[in-house]
Amino acid sequence: MTLSLVIAAGGTGGHMIPADALSDALLRRGHRVTLLTDARGLRFPGLFERAERHVIAAATASGMNPLAWARAWLSVRQGRAEGKRIARDVGANAVIGFGGYPALPGMLAGIALKLPVILHEQNAVLGRVNRYMANKVSAIALTYAQTGRVDGALQRKVVVTGNPVRQAINDARDLPYEVPVGDAPFRLLVIGGSQGARILSTLVPAAIAALPAQLRARLVVQQQCRPEDLSGVVEAYRATGVQAEALAYMADLPQRMAAAHLVVSRAGASTMAELMAMGRPAILIPYKAATDDHQTANAAGFVATGAGVMLPEDSTSAATMAGHLTGFMGSHEALAGAAAAAKALGHPDAAERLADLVEKEVRAVAGSVAQ
């Protein structure tokens, strides 16, 4: 049976990338996919190219300003009305929400229409919107079996699917991880998530400058950073004599990750899923201001298995980073072991698992109606 399925997602790449991976899985099964998003959700090139896309009203507020909260709620109500109209127009069978405030109006629209609503949590702590919706939805799909803020009453709805990754990541999963031997080039990939990370633009070049000359000579660095940081990063590497490339956006990130021997990164949801699906060791610096400190929670299990190390943002120095780089560059066994540990954590079939759950929830509702 061909289904019409609405995906509610927006904001950051951490929400949009797994939502797009699910969309591809559903489209391969012959279903129709409609995206409800905010304006930011359409700024990522290459996502949802085969789906019908709609921008609907959405907003969030913080602080204690009652007028800001009132305006945000009015925007959410408007988005819910728009979402209901679109869902009716496409004959929606279910709504799948990926958390974050841009997904809230679409999920509320599904609830209002009495459709199955499935939410997916990408992080190791249930986000605020997903916490608000958890008691209202049909099913809760988790990336991590141990996810914070999922209390006992919600466990009956839980299915652990993993976090969907791009097909290009899965395509590279079977490529062998080749440890550099002797004086062979050591490829270091530095990424800061969809919005970049300023701390990596200063910390990593400084750490590399502190390395012995023989290690710097082996390094080939590719670093993603904010546009405003590009010139400073390029100049810092030029001063060290290290072969380096700095870009604001890496359209071919899966291929770059596949070629990397080591990754330095934040611990955002999509980055973690891709590191684990592909099996790449990493030095992780969680974003300290992330809601509920979820990036530290994301990194904890990865580090506990020996797949990498985690450095706290507040207390990490260039010397500390240089020490870890030296350790990885000097030990074939450490690199190979960390890569294998990362790969063992991956869920390369997460998009298919989530698609299975969506179809199951629709069939359950159809069965209850038939009775």
Image: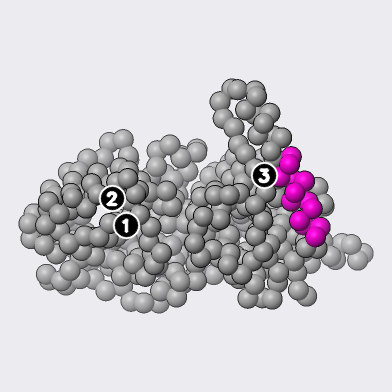
The image position of residue 260, as x and y in percent, is: 29, 66
Kindly identify which residue carries mark 1: 247
Residue type indicated by callout 2: Leu
Of residues 259 and 327, which is closer to you in this image? Answer: 259
Q: Taking the image as drawn, is residue 339 in sight?
A: yes
Q: Give yes or no for residue 16 being in the magenta stretch.
A: no
Question: Quick check: 24 left or right of 199?
Answer: right
Secondary structure of the residue carrying tag 1 is strand
Residue 371 is drawn in which quadrant? bottom right
Image marks 3 and 2: residues in contact by CB distance under 8 Å: no
Where does label 3 land, which residue? Answer: 57
Q: Give the quarter of the image for residue 219.
A: bottom left
Residue 81 is covered by the magenta coloring: yes
Neighbour tally class for label 1: few under 14, some 14-19, many 20 plus, Cα within 10 Å: some
Q: Position of residue 14 (x, y in %)?
A: 50, 53
240 up-or-down from 364: above or below: above
Badge 1 vs badge 2, beta-carbon distance below 8 Å: yes
Figure check: 362 above or below 112: below
* Residue 116 seen in the current view: no
Side of 19 relative to 345 (left or right) = right
Disc with the residue nearer the chain's start (3 vs 1): 3
At 64% from the left and 72% from the top, the residue drawn is: 27
